[in-house]
Every structure is written in C-alpha cells, then in structure tokens.
Image (tube, rainbow, N blue to C red):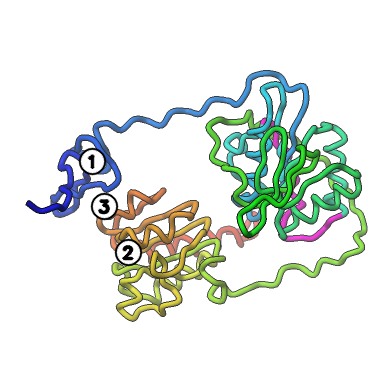
Amino acid sequence: MSGAKRVDPRRPYRIGPNGLRRIVLGETGAGDLAVGASRNSEAPRAKPLRTQVAATSWHMAIAHAYQGRLDDHAREAIAAAAILAASEKGVIAVILGAFHENAAALGADKVVIVDDLDAARFEPRREEGVVEALINDYQPEHIFLPDNALGDGDLGRRLIAKLRASAATHVSEIDDKHVAVGWSGGGCLADAPLPRFVLLQAGAVDSNLPFLGAGEVLSAPLAADVKDVCRDLGLEATEMGSIALEEADFIVSAGNGVTNVATLEKLAGCFDAAVGASRVAVDDGKFPRSKQIGASGKTVTATTYMAVGISGAVQHLQGIKACRHVIAINSDPGAPIIKRADLTVVGDAEEVMQALIARVGQARTQSETPEGQV
C-alpha cells in the first residue's frame, strides 16, 4: 500500500465553474453543495464590550493617522492600553489626523480625533499643545505610543521631557506591572516597573482584541497656532514604481489570468499602487523577477493587496499572509485566493480592470468638479 495520506472527501469543498468539487485545504468537516459554504459553518459571534463599568481613571494612547487609517503599530499601542486596563479604568485614544475606521474595534472607550494634525505635516509644538491639554484634562495613569520614526516616537519623547515623566522606550514586552526591552540576540536587555509613558516596539502586543471599546467620538480641542522653530518643507512625492514591494502600502499584482500588462499597470497607476506578480506571470516573461511575490519571491505587508488573475498557490499565499486587506479578481469562483480574500470580484480580469479604471476616473472627475457646476 502507498504511504501517501488520502484527502478526506468529506472536507468542505466548493463547486467550480466546470462542476467539479474543489476541496478547501486546511478545514475539516462535512462537505456542502453550496458554493463557498460548509454545513458546520457558524455566523461569527459579536464581540462583547471590554467593560460596562463607569470609568474612574484612564489609560491614554496617542498615534498619528495617515490617509484616514492607523497602521498596525498604532493599533498595537491602543490595544496595549485596553488590555492592561482594569474594568473601572477607561481607555481614551488620541488620533492625530483624519480617521475613518471603526473606533470601537480598537478597544478605545473614547476617541479624540484631531483632524488638522497628521503624519503628513511636522508641527511638534501644536501637537504638544493639544495632547498636553488632554493629558491635563484626563490625568491618565499610563500613556502608550508606538515607538516609530513617523512622528509618534518624536512626540512621545517631547512629552516625556516636558512633563518630566517616568518612561520606557523600545518596549518589547509588557504586562500590568512591568516592561522589558529586548535586544537583537533575543535576550532581555532591561526591565522596569510599568512607567507613565510606554513607547512600544512593533509587534509587542497583538492588536486583534477579543472585545470592543465603547468607541465614543469626542470633539477635539483646537490646536493653537504656535510658531514652530522648525519649518515643514512638506513631503516629497515618490513614484510607486521606485518603492520596494516590501514597503508598498497598496499593491496590484498580476497572475496568469492577466493578458494585458499595460491595463494592469494603468490600474495600479489609478490607485497610486505598486505592481507585483505571481511566479507564473514572472516565468512567462511578463514581469521581472524583482516583482515576484510569494515564498520564492518577496513577502509583502501591504494594507491593500489586489490579486488580479492569480489562482492563489500556497507559495503565493505565504507571501501575502501579512497583508491586511486582500481583493481578488478571478474568473474561477473556486480559486484558492478567494478563500484568503476579503472581497472577490468574479469575472474576466481584463473586463474588470477596464471597468475599475473607468470608475476611478469618473470618481476623480466628480471630486474635482467645483460645487454648483455640472
């Protein structure tokens, strides 16, 4: 007898367009005749509130938003404030910049959004004034920030110096009593009691919380017009094609289902996205090896990853496992990429890309039309 393991035919499966069953790898249980469903599937349970007790004291988290979103590092700082908060302690998140996401999912009970201060401008004194006023109002016991080079780390150190507060930076481990700083060799460089200011390294806390915050959005104090000693020269625009795939925030990636590379590159340009490719598309000579994403290529961490005509081999899925949102465009509703995708468009890749290009162009034209004109 062969020593190879047999695939359990009762495992969940999908019906492909050719009428054949496609086993869904990684799942167990009885199969189902419905496309994309299994008999044992259950509706996701709603997360409970972290606490329903009125707050008598506070934890505060501070972070910059960019283009209406928080990155994973910022989310981890807010999650740390929520995880370490006792039931009678509230969590207030101060977000510098416009913010369009669900505040309750972050674990925050109150959210102050300061629209006119974001990561695109360097205005340290105005930021200090707004945040210091909120600290004086709420008197938080502990204050959490992501320790990064994008403004949060700088702001945290300025506040620490100005308020002469206890602090720990580059924190890699934390609990309700202590913090620890690691080093590249994997050991603990130092630990200390939990200070008032905690600047966290990326990955120190899991931001996927099992609970929700109340998510109440509060009006922000006005940022005073303070003359800074620094002059902001603005951000220098960078061509997305020159950015490494590992650093790109939005990637449009092509697979074997893409027949017109020019259309895909035009679509990527509409979204100011970088261009990637599957191994099959690279082996076919459509893209250089530097664009290959997957286990034998680049591993990417984009906020949005659009897979066009990519079936979703295991090696490719390994390369995109850290992407936050995956959009699949594929003519095969049973392709493995669809199981990984948050949003799927089933259709011909060329037709869908052309429709998206037209729709984005239409939306931009409407947004540029002055009010009152047609």
Secondary-structure class at tag 3:
loop
Specify the principal SS of the magenta part: loop
Give residue 200's position: percent from left, percent from top.
Answer: 69, 48
| Quarter of the figure that contains the C terminus | bottom right
Q: Residue at x 52, y 62 (%)?
A: 250
Q: What segment is highlighted magenta in the picture?
A: 109-124
The answer to whether marks 2 and 1 mark residues whose Cβ atoms lie closer than 8 Å is no
Secondary-structure class at tag 1:
loop
The image shows residue 181, relative to residue 37, as above or below, that is below
The front one of 128 and 207 is 207
Which of marks 2 and 3 precedes in the sequence? 2
Kindly report the distance in space between the C-alpha atoms of the residues bearing marks 3 and 2. Answer: 11 Å
Q: Residue at x 41, y 55 (%)?
A: 327
Q: Residue at x 46, y 64 (%)?
A: 299
Any mark on residue 309, and which? 2
Horizontal relation, residue 355 to residue 210: left or right: left
Horizontal relation, residue 277 to residue 47: left or right: left
Q: Residue at x 43, y 58 (%)?
A: 320
Kindly report the distance in space between the C-alpha atoms of the residues bearing marks 2 and 1. Answer: 24 Å
Give residue 286's position: percent from left, percent from top.
Answer: 35, 79
- Magenta run includes residue 294: no
Kindly report the distance in space between the C-alpha atoms of the residues bearing marks 1 and 3. Answer: 15 Å
Any mark on residue 12, and which? 1
Write down the residue under mark 3: 333
Displayed quadrant of residue 236: bottom right
Which amino acid, mark 2? Gly
- Magenta run includes residue 118: yes
Displayed quadrant of residue 140: top right
Which amino acid, mark 3? Pro
Secondary-structure class at tag 2:
loop
Any mark on residue 37, and which? none
